[in-house]
Amino acid sequence: MLHPPRQSLQVAAVPSQRVPVRDRDQDEPWHTEAVCRRDEAGLFFAPSKEPTAARLSREDAAKRVCARCPVMVECREHALLQPEPYGVWGGLTAAERRVVLARRRRREMELKQTARTVAAAG
Ligand code: SF4
């Protein structure tokens, strides 16, 4: 899936259909195994003005695809590191990825604080 702003990896939010990866994305070794390389059903990105119930249903369907994808872990990390702002990646919606990232940031801050405390005491 590729997102309009960055057109990074799998496919784009071109009207309900994924498009082939861009050249630079083909360097991602895991990408060739992505189950969603062709998203004919348009599961991974929201069409404009999508009602909430339809969005939830579509996202659930996308997550079921991700659950059987052999590169889900790699895809998820890619989406978190970019970060990818839209769509379902690695079994997570954009909102879920924001939660994961916030937890990571909080955890990193806690670890840094612990390291400073230990250094000051030592
Ligand atoms: S985990 Fe989901 S979004 Fe990622 S490559 Fe696999 S099917 Fe596509």
Image (cartoon, rainbow, N blue to C red):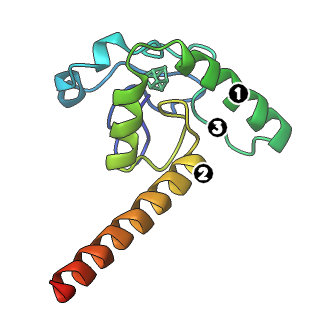
Q: Earlier in the sequence, mark 1 or mark 2?
A: 1
Give x and y (percent) for residue 57.
78, 29
- Residue that numbered label 1 is attached to: 60
Q: Which of the 4 image quarters holds residue 3?
A: top left
- Residue that numbered label 3 is attached to: 46
Question: Residue drawn at (52%, 55%), measured in percent from left and top?
Answer: 98
Q: Earlier in the sequence, mark 3 or mark 1?
A: 3
SS at circle 1? helix
| Residue type (three-letter) at the residue carrying disc 3 | Ala
Local crowd size for mark 1, using a 10 Å CA cut-off: few (<14), some (14–19), many (≥20): some
Question: Residue drawn at (48%, 16%), measured in percent from left and top?
Answer: 36
Q: Look at the numbered disc 3 and say if its residue's Cβ is closer than 8 Å to ligand 1.
A: no
- Residue that numbered label 2 is attached to: 95
Give x and y (percent) for residue 95.
60, 51
Q: Which one is nearer the viewer's eye here, 112 or 61?
A: 112
Residue 80 shown left or right of residue 119 in the figure: right
| Residue type (three-letter) at the residue carrying disc 1 | Asp
Instruction: Determine the CA span between mark 1 and mark 2.
Output: 14 Å
Residue 31 shown left or right of residue 64 in the figure: left
Q: Quadrant of the N terminus?
A: top left
SS at circle 3? loop
Question: Residue drawn at (58%, 47%), measured in percent from left and top?
Answer: 96
Question: Residue drawn at (55%, 56%), measured in percent from left and top?
Answer: 99
Local crowd size for mark 2, using a 10 Å CA cut-off: few (<14), some (14–19), many (≥20): few
Q: Is residue 67 above or below residue 57?
A: above
Instruction: Determine the CA span between mark 3 and mark 1.
Output: 12 Å
Q: Quadrant of the C terminus?
A: bottom left
| Mark 2 or 3: the one toward you | 2
Tell me if I can see residue 75 in this picture: yes
Q: Look at the numbered disc 1 and say if its residue's Cβ is closer than 8 Å to ligand 1.
A: no
